[in-house]
Amino acid sequence: MLIGNGWDLHRHSTDKPLFLAGLEYNDDGFEAYSDGDIILHALCDALLGSVGKKDLGHYFPSNESTKKGIRSTEMLNKILEIIEYDRLKVNNIDITFISQRILISDKREDLERNISTLLNIDVKKINIKGKTTDFTGLIGDKKASACLVTILIENA
């Protein structure tokens, strides 16, 4: 068994659309060099960590070597190649989405289904929970949102 965890946090932006788990929503997005999809960024770091690879920024630095505005789905596909995902089996993924601004319960089922499709796994292996910070700090002030991901995998 291998376990990995990842997390990401971005400030909100009124200038960009919202991307979560590879889906685009007609809401305020995040400031980022990429599309700012904090769920997929945290998932990529969890996948990388589970097999002892470096972090997402190592493979996709926020500079000219990475295409500005790159979609996180493209990043995820590259990470799946790097970790030789076809040789792994996901047992479960636990995702905690922390925001005072985005109500995750309205999007949960769609997000879980899309992650299921992206990783080619049963949707029942994915759990997404929404939390707030009770109006405390950067997240509580609705200036940013964060995501934590834990993944348990094994060799296939």
Image (cartoon, helix red, strand yellow):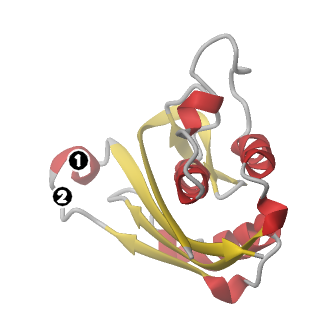
Tell me where residue 9 appears, x and y as whole percent: 40, 44
Tell me where residue 133 appears, x and y as whole percent: 22, 62
Mark 2 crowd level (few <14, some 14–19, many ≥20, 10 Å Cα): few
Secondary structure state at the residue bearing disc 1: loop
Circle 1 residue: 141
Tell me where residue 24 appears, x and y as whole percent: 70, 52
Secondary structure state at the residue bearing disc 2: loop
Q: State the residue at coordinates (69%, 27%).
A: 69
Q: Earlier in the sequence, mark 2 or mark 1?
A: 2
76 left or right, relative to 3: right
Q: State the residue at coordinates (70%, 14%).
A: 65
Circle 2 residue: 135
Residue closest to the eye, 42 or 110: 42
Mark 1 crowd level (few <14, some 14–19, many ≥20, 10 Å Cα): some
Residue type marked 1: Asp
Residue type marked 2: Phe
The number of callouts visible is: 2
- The answer to whether residue 42 is above or below residue 111 is above
- The answer to whether residue 54 is above or below residue 61 is below
